[in-house]
Structures are given as structure tokens and as C-alpha cells.
Image: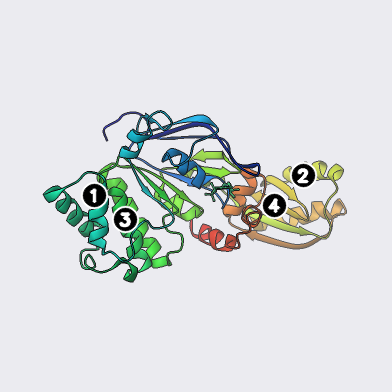
Amino acid sequence: MSTRAPAVQARQLVKTYPGDVTALSGLDITVEPGTVFGLLGPNGAGKSTTVKILTTLARPDSGTATVAGHDVLRHPDRVRRAIGVVAQKSGADPVATGRENLQLQGRLYGLRGADLNRRVTELLDRFRLSDAAGRQVKGYSGGMQRRLDVALGLVHRPEVLFLDEPTTGLDPEARTAMWDEITRLAGDEGLSILLTTHYLEEADRLAERIAVVDRGHVVVEGTPDGLKGELRGDAVHLELRAPVQDAGRTLLESALAALPGVRETQFDGRRVSVRADDGAAAVPALLGALERAGVAVTAATVARPSLDDVYLRYAGRRYSEAQAATGDESAADALAPAGGAR
Ligand code: ADP
């Protein structure tokens, strides 16, 4: 690491797209050098826009950012030399071989001759692509293609690596393999890595710190353990026959929250979400309190807290709603891995 400045520091980034779309509404993050930082959020949260600004591909309307100590607006050329970018969409040429892709990328960064060949061979070896080095990239599996993408981002030995949704579209096996690669990178090379993801498990596995992004800003930030620690206990979900009117709602919320072992309650239309130390033990008391208040319950489920619960708690709406608002139907896919992340 050649700098002691934060690898990334963004302050109050605001970005609006034509049509009055607010992509960023005052985003703050700090990535310490030599660490892996995860930006976690549903589609449309503003993750890619953040990466575009930090990698000098877009300008913020306001706010400031430095990467590897360089200001992204004043010294974009210095930033570009200091970073590697692995975009969601592969930048590799499908009709060129893996080796040719790496050689071209190296030449773009000024590597030549023996230096270039050494670096290309090293990367092919490190990303387990030596055997496939002479084959056209269009014949690579999804996992191989992603590994090549990461290798391409590292050719010029950047200080900060941006990984935008590194495992989206990979099958579970290739995803796990990619997680191992990223962990190795972070450990071996002392690189600073900023990754974006909509998988809780991915952020949990890879990132030393996570910033949860929703609607263009960070709603909560911390270590994976810290964030999970705040979600200890069970999530109890109750389905009501009819929504509770505003007037009765506050009263009911405090009545439920006062029950033993109940930490927090949130009403959301006909659904009530409760965090309780022991969900199964809390259900009878919750049902009793609601019955006394004349509120009919049609279903009750107990589960360990999920990504949805993190969102509901910090962003004030359900993760699935946030995904649905962008027309993305993969909410269930994004939520699924959260089950294994506790
Ligand atoms: P994420 O990466 O978290 O999915 P994005 O940064 O891509 O989020 O998008 C944030 C918001 O900005 C979304 O509402 C998206 O539709 C909008 N957006 C992103 N890029 C553009 C663009 N080029 N033009 C208009 N709106 C955009």
C-alpha cells in the first residue's frame, strides 16, 4: 500500500439523472487502506452510480470524493492509474484468447516486453487460467470469464480494486470459488477492495465493513458481526385480517413492545414485524395482546432475521418492495442467501 490516506473517501455525494431520478442523495463512505468494503443494497439503491463516480466515469452534482488519496474531480487521471475496475459487464474481447486480452490490457497501461509477459503469466496462473490461456474467451465458463475480468483489473497492480456485483449471474459453485479468489486477493496483496453486492451473504463473507445503501444514501454501516449482532433474536411476522388505523397503531406498537422478550415492532399495512429474543415463546403473548385490542390475526410465522428484516429496520421498507420498485423480479434470489448468513 503506497498511501496512508483512506483508499476511498466519499462525502455527501449527490447525483441526479435526467427525469428527476435521484440516484445518490448524500452518500458518505470511507474505506480504510488494505481492507475489503462492501456496499450492500437492492437494485436501484445507487451502488453502480457510486462506483461510476469513484472510478471517474461520472461526475457528482455535488459532494467530494478521493480515491487512493486523489480527488476524483481534480485528478481523474491519477485516480485511473491507481484503480482497477471490474464492471458488471465483462470488458474482455470474446474472440481474443485469455492471454491476448491480458496482453492488450497490459499494453494499455504501458507494460511492454518481458515485464508484460511475466505479469500476464503470473495472472493466468494465479486465476487458474493457464490451461485456457490460448482459447477464445467466448468458450469460457461464467466463472472463468469472471476470473479473467478480475485479472484484467489487476494487470497494472492497482492500489484500489472496484468489483461491481462480482458474482451476479454465477452458479453457486462458481460464486463460492470467486469468493475464495477475492478473499485471497485481499489477504495476499494488501489491496483495498470496494465491492458492491445485493447479496447479504456475499458482503458478510468478504467485507470487513459493510455500508447498507438504500435510496442513494447509507442507512447503516458497520462490521458484519456488528450488524448481525443488532439483529439477534427471532423475527416474528404476523398477518392481520385488516390494516390497523394510524390512531390505534402507535398505542398497539407500544403495547406489543412492552411484552416480555419483545424488542421491537413495526406495522406495515396488514403485516406486523416483531423482533423477539425467543420468537416461539413470544407468539402466544403477541396473539393475546392483539386479540384484547380486537385485532384479528390470520397467520403467524417465526424465523431468524433475514436481509428483509435488516432493510425493514434501517430503510423503513421491505427489501422485496425495494427490488419490486425497480421492476426487478430477482428479489427472492437476492434474499435466499441471507438464510445462510447468520
Ligand atoms: P444500483 O447499482 O444500486 O442498482 P444504480 O446506481 O444503478 O443503482 O441506480 C440508482 C438509480 O439511478 C436508479 O433509480 C436507476 O434507475 C437510476 N439510474 C442509473 N443510471 C441512470 C442513467 N444513466 N439514467 C437515468 N437514470 C439512471
- Residue 10 image position (x, y, % from top left): 47, 33
Q: In which image quadrant can residue 73 be found?
A: top left
Kindly tell me whether residue 342 is visible in this rendering: no
The amino acid type of the residue labelled 4 equals Ser
Label whose residue precedes the other's in the sequence (3 or 2): 3
Within-10-Å neighbours for mark 3: few <14, some 14–19, many 20+:
some
Label whose residue precedes the other's in the sequence (4 or 1): 1
Q: Nearer the viewer, mark 4 or mark 1?
A: 1
The residue singled out by tag 3 in the image is: 181
- Some atom of ligand 1 lies within 8 Å of the CB belonging to the residue at label 2: no
**Label annotation for residue 106:** 1
Q: Secondary structure at mark 4?
A: strand
Q: Secondary structure at mark 2?
A: helix
In-image side of 240 versus 152 (left or right):
right
Q: Residue at x 38, y 61 (%)?
A: 176
The residue singled out by tag 2 in the image is: 253
Q: Nearer the viewer, mark 3 or mark 2?
A: 3
Q: Residue at x 65, y 50 (%)?
A: 276
| Residue situated in front as seen by the camera: 67 or 138 | 138
- Some atom of ligand 1 lies within 8 Å of the CB belonging to the residue at label 1: no
Which residue is farthest left?
A: 114
- Some atom of ligand 1 lies within 8 Å of the CB belonging to the residue at label 3: no
Label whose residue precedes the other's in the sequence (2 or 1): 1
Within-10-Å neighbours for mark 4: few <14, some 14–19, many 20+:
many
Label whose residue precedes the other's in the sequence (4 or 2): 2
The residue singled out by tag 4 in the image is: 273
- Residue 302 image position (x, y, % from top left): 65, 59
Residues under numbered marks 3 and 2 in contact, where contact means CB atoms less than 8 Å apart: no
Q: Secondary structure at mark 1?
A: helix
